[in-house]
Amino acid sequence: MSANWISTRAWLLMLPLLVVMVSVIGWPLVDTVRLSFTDAKLVGTAGSFVGIDNYAKMLTGSNFQRALVTTTWFAVVSVTAEMVLGVFAALLLNQQFRGRAALRALMILPWALPTVVNATLWRLIYNPEYGALNAALTQLGLIDSYRSWLGEPGSALTALIIADCWKNFPLVALIALAALQAVPRDITAAALVDGAGPFNRFRFVVMPYLAGPLLVALVLRTIEAFKVFDIIWVMTRGGPANSTRTLSILVYQEAFSFQRAGSGASLALIVTLLVTVLAVAYAALLRRAAGAS
């Protein structure tokens, strides 16, 4: 059987999938690009061609710049906290102790919860009238009166980051725990005999095995955090005073709340481009890490 025939048959077998992908992904993407160059409304009019005005307006607007800063801060802080907590949790769960299996199972629960359920749970915890957080802090004497954690611009974003970390750090922990299982016991035992302390054993023995898997976790969580929508929409809807409005929230408001389909499409494409740049950069890091190993 010739190589050309094998290649042709492979393309024929993939043809149904390619048709589905073009129909489901390709056409909506092309139509979004077309809309981004018009002043179309969501309902009523197809709009007229305006060139790159939508892009210029979005990129230079204060709403976009503030949302970009909020999104970047949310992504950097939440992902950093998740990576640190995940590694510490993995190191703990890698030790031998009674009840380890049960604790491993319990750790999966926050990550397994649907995001809407997680957001609703934390919204109840932060409730300014009967929330568990206010009750606990008041009884401990850390605050004098109940606070509206999600109603104050200074604390709302931090409260969202805590809720996001609680849900997603188990994913990092599971990835790190799986990598720890590959660390040879004899190497760690030899390092202990040679007098290496806990920090040096982690840095020189354990970390080389964790680096690759943690980089994968970093890629996944950074991209997800940068396009976060659901947890913020359920808990604050971008408020108060737009202090938690991320780029995805801004896209939703522009396209659906204000019904400006043209500018909403241009903003969605800008966000897509930013996420693509992140993905390409991380893919390069992964290839470099794979080549180094």
Image (cartoon, grey):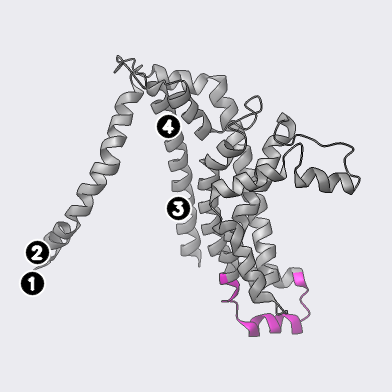
Horizontal and vertical percent position of residue 224:
51, 47
Q: Which residue is mark 4?
A: 268
Q: Which residue is mark 1?
A: 1
Q: Earlier in the sequence, mark 4 or mark 2?
A: 2
Dots 3, 1 in contact, CB < 8 A:
no
Separation of marks 4 and 1 at Cα, in angstroms: 47 Å
Magenta residues (range): 178-198
Image height of 173 relative to 54, above or below: below
Q: Which mark is residue 292?
A: none
Q: Earlier in the sequence, mark 3 or mark 1?
A: 1
Dots 1, 2 in contact, CB < 8 A:
yes
Give the quadrant of residue 218. Answer: bottom right
Dots 4, 2 in contact, CB < 8 A:
no
Could you say which is closer to the camera, residue 273 or residue 191?
273
Tell me, yes or no, whether the highlighted magenta stretch contains residue 106: no
Query: Which amino acid, mark 3?
Result: Ala
Q: Main structural element of the magenta stretch: helix, strand or loop?
A: helix
Marks counted in the figure total 4
Separation of marks 3 and 2 at Cα, in angstroms: 33 Å
Q: Which residue is mark 2?
A: 5
Image height of 54 relative to 4, above or below: above
Q: Which residue is mark 3?
A: 283
Q: Earlier in the sequence, mark 4 or mark 1?
A: 1
Can you say which quadrant of the picture contains the N terminus?
Answer: bottom left
Q: Residues within 10 Å of mark 1 (few under 14, many from 20)?
A: few
